[in-house]
Image: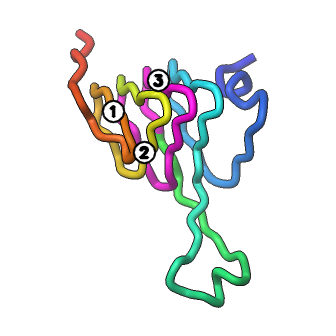
């Protein structure tokens, strides 16, 4: 079994590209939401129109339980996202990020 197969066991719905680096860990009840819905166009919203934007999670990342990652977001290498956080903007490499929206609160050492 590959890591991706292990991650996809359970309650997953994938409607857009999700790129996972090596050694990514995703906690229970995480939500990787690639769908974007129109806000300004009432007709398109009524019709249920949507498009997707990819999510990219770098090598050796750890997403805590109940983390939500929004469409089009890239999470840098060696980054940890705290439980319950909502990631709506890209996160750099080597940080711990927490909160709603997720904000880096400290840097992590760079691996040698």
Q: Which residues are magenta?
A: 57-77
Q: Earlier in the sequence, mark 1 or mark 2?
A: 2
The residue that appears at 24% across and 19% down in the rendered structure is 108
Q: Which residue is mark 1?
A: 97
Disc 2: which residue: 87
Quick one: SS at disc 1? strand
Query: Quick one: which residue is furthest to the top in this view?
Result: 112
Q: Position of residue 68 (x, y in %)?
A: 53, 42
Q: Of callouts 2 and 3, which one flags the residue occurring earlier in the amino acid sequence?
A: 3
Image position of 19 with respect to 112: above or below: below
Is residue 27 placed above or below 50 in the rendered structure?
A: above
Q: Position of residue 86 (x, y in %)?
A: 45, 44
Q: Are marks 1 and 2 in contact (CB under 8 Å)?
A: yes
User: Residue 76: horizontal and vertical position, in percent?
Assistant: 35, 34
* Mark 2 neighbour class, 10 Å CA radius: few under 14, some 14 to 19, many 20 or more: many
Distance, label 1 to label 2, CA atoms, is 9 Å
């Amino acid at each position: 079994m590959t890591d991706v197969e292990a991650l996809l066991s359970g309650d997953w719905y994938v409607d857009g590209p999700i790129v996972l680096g090596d050694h990514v860990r995703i906690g229970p009840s995480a939500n990787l939401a690639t769908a974007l819905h129109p806000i300004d166009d009432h007709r398109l919203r009524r019709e249920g129109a949507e498009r997707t934007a990819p999510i990219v999670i770098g090598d050796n990342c750890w997403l805590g339980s109940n983390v939500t990652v929004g469409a089009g977001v890239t999470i840098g290498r060696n980054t940890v996202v705290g439980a319950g956080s909502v990631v709506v903007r890209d996160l750099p490499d080597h940080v711990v990020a927490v909160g709603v929206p997720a904000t880096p609160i400290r840097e992590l050492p760079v691996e040698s």
